[in-house]
Amino acid sequence: MELKQIESFVRVAELGSFTKAAQALNIPQPLLSRHVRQLEVELRQNLLMRNGRGVTVTEAGLVMLEHGRGILHQVAVAQEELGSVRGALAGRVSIGLPPSLSKLVTVPLTLSFREALPHAQLSLTEGFSVLMVESLRAGRLDMAVLYNPPPSPDLEMTVLHEDALILIASNKRQAEPLEPALKAVMPLAHLAELPLIVPSRPNAFRLLIETEMLRVNCKPNIVLEIDGLNAILELVKEGLGYAVLPPYTLRNFGTTHDFTTHRIEPPKLTSQLMLVWSARRPMTATLKAAMQVMQDEVAKAMT
């Protein structure tokens, strides 16, 4: 199995076309086809299904695609680490971001990264914590920003920001007869009597709400599950329920005057935003510089 075969297969699988992949790799299409076929022969598996509209990936191909991406990323990391020996801050840095933070930091992070590391390449991926942890362990991500990650011997982490979740309500909503009156400070147990609009599992905020409410012998009254914080706030704005989110999520939303916010305690719902990376890989100069840029931009976004 050769690296050029893996790279050829990954590009064809990602682009769904031999023609597009050949153009992306700047090699003749017959040579590209030969690389992919040689890989299939060596693995004794059909990785791609050819059809008139292009190609689709087989079940075996999906497995190889995941491994192939990891292999190509590790080769890029090795090249970057060798470059760092020469003192050059170069190579590819892949960072995972949660959807709630991505909209806030993607543009400023990209601009600061280009300024601090002009010879390095930035790759940003948006995803849930569970998937990003798997990508860190597989070597597909160099670092990720995660909410409340559990301790793990193969991961290093540092706190970027700590926030207490708040109850968000709409000025439009007419409270139901049995709902508790909204006050500046709401005990966590009172949330069990409010119709909540929450993200679906395994969202970190959802898990935190359920876990902490269980500690006070109650459970959330979930009336809607919506993936997308702006979509949740739109529904809250229309008076269809309440949200429990960090204060900064309202910055993504243009009309904050439509909402009222209420502290939750006792107890507080404290969420930790952590920068996480693999403990099994060396920390190169480029990754250290990228980590500093990430820390600075998150700090700016949260102030």
Image: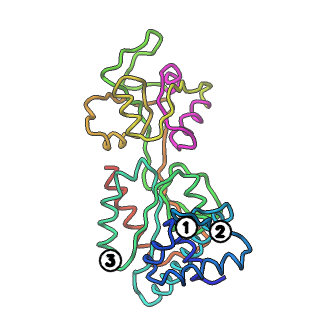
State the residue position of label 2: 47
> Looking at this view, is 202 or 194 the one in front?
202
Asked whether disc 1 touches disc 2, contact meaning CB atoms under 8 Å apart, the reply is: yes
Q: Is residue 57 left or right of residue 44?
A: left
Residue at image position (43%, 62%) is 124
Q: Is residue 201 left or right of residue 83?
A: right
Q: Is residue 55 magenta?
A: no
Q: CA distance from mark 2 to mark 3?
A: 37 Å
Could you say whether the residue bearing mark 1 is in a helix, strand or loop?
Answer: helix
Principal SS element in the magenta part? helix
Q: Residue furthest bottom?
A: 86
State the residue position of label 1: 13
At label 2, counting other C-alpha atoms closer than 10 Å, the crowd grade (few under 14, some 14-19, many 20 or more) is many
State the residue position of label 3: 118
Q: CA distance from mark 1 to mark 3?
A: 30 Å
Q: Position of residue 223 (x, y in %)?
A: 51, 25
The amino acid type of the residue labelled 1 equals Ala
